[in-house]
Amino acid sequence: MGPMGVSVSRSRVFLCILLLTGVIYYLYFGLVRNRDSQVDLRQLLALAIRAAEEGGNAVREVRVSDSLGQRSKGKTKEGADELLTTGDLLSHGRMSSLFSNSFPGIKLISEEHDTSKVNKSLTWNYEIPNLVQESIVNARMVSTKSVTVWIDPLDATQEYTEDLKHFVTTMVCVAVDGKPVIGVIHKPFSKYTAWAMVDGASNIHPRKAYNEKTPTVIVSRSHAGAVKSYCQGAFGNGTTILPAGGAGYKVLSLLDSGEGTQLDSADVYIHVTFIKKWDICAGNAIMKALGGQMTTIEGDLIDYSDFPSNNGGLVASIGIDHHALLKRLPALKSLAPKIN
């Protein structure tokens, strides 16, 4: 019994060591793999385009069916009703499901917070369209942990309810380490999509010339009066002010989109109150990719890592001296106090 008992004991010890080694191997290499998980930015661009267009389909379907389900989800910082429609929620569901199903480990921030389950039927085939592959030949790999995706399922909801369809967009932005890298702005009712990747490519371009001395300024419809006096203090009483809805639409007004429903053309986009980052991240990425700038009114870059609020106002320009432009702007304190 003795020798046999020793043999059995040694076998058990060997088996335990083997199992323990396997567990350590699995845990170690699993952690390393998760830590070093990477994604090609070209794939994220392709998915961003698909998601923005899928969200646009939802927005259009709801508007055409005239089943908006309009209601208020609270008040803005300026005291106006913040509207929510079935179009917002349906678009959010489709856009967020596409990203969650395709890259479940990537941080996703959307304007809406619908708690319904992810729609598993919405899938993506991971193929990069030929136009993107031809424009950006080499893979652009980044750590998934560095990526934040910002979704605006329906920009210009107020205008959407008023049937001012040309202002409405759906937007996706990909930020890496807080910096905007990919921007997609889709117009659901004309089915036009603008996209750009920083240090990559774009399907939209700056205009040939901009008026730096007396710029035409595009601003929000909701507080055009306050911004008008602010801009006239900077550029003179003859300054042309264009009130418009939607941050995505305003960014496109600075560029040469060649798109028929882009009715306004501006030199500078200024916003003087509180604004959320899902409204501006895609536009910021596009401006940056094309050589333009989007900053706070004090000239600070905007971080898109996570915190959704931007309290410092907004100035976007391209083809002009952005720093000289900022120097001409009055102090912001009386118009946009800091929000806690």
Image (cartoon, rainbow, N blue to C red):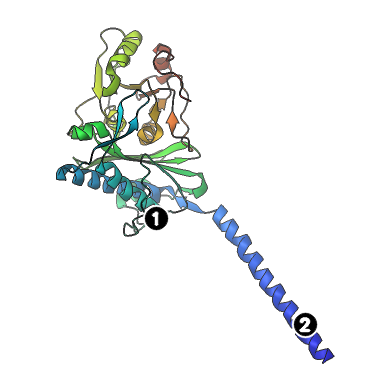
Visible residue check, residue 202: no
Farthest right residue in view = 2
- From this view, report whether residue 18 is shown above or below residue 228: below
Q: CA distance from mark 1 to mark 2?
A: 49 Å
Q: Position of residue 291 (x, y in %)?
A: 39, 30
The residue identified by callout 2 is 9
Q: Nearer the viewer, residue 55 or 339?
A: 339
Farthest bottom residue in view = 1
Q: Is residue 274 left or right of residue 32?
A: left
Question: Residue at the spot x=40%, y=22% of the render?
Answer: 313
Q: Nearer the viewer, residue 116 or 215?
A: 116
- From this view, report whether residue 169 is shown above or below residue 22: above
Q: Position of residue 309 (x, y in %)?
A: 43, 31
Q: Is residue 309 left or right of residue 90?
A: right
Local crowd at mark 2 within 10 Å, few (<14), some, or many (≥20)?
A: few
The residue identified by callout 1 is 102
Q: Position of residue 198 (x, y in %)?
A: 41, 38
Amino acid marked by disc 2: Ser
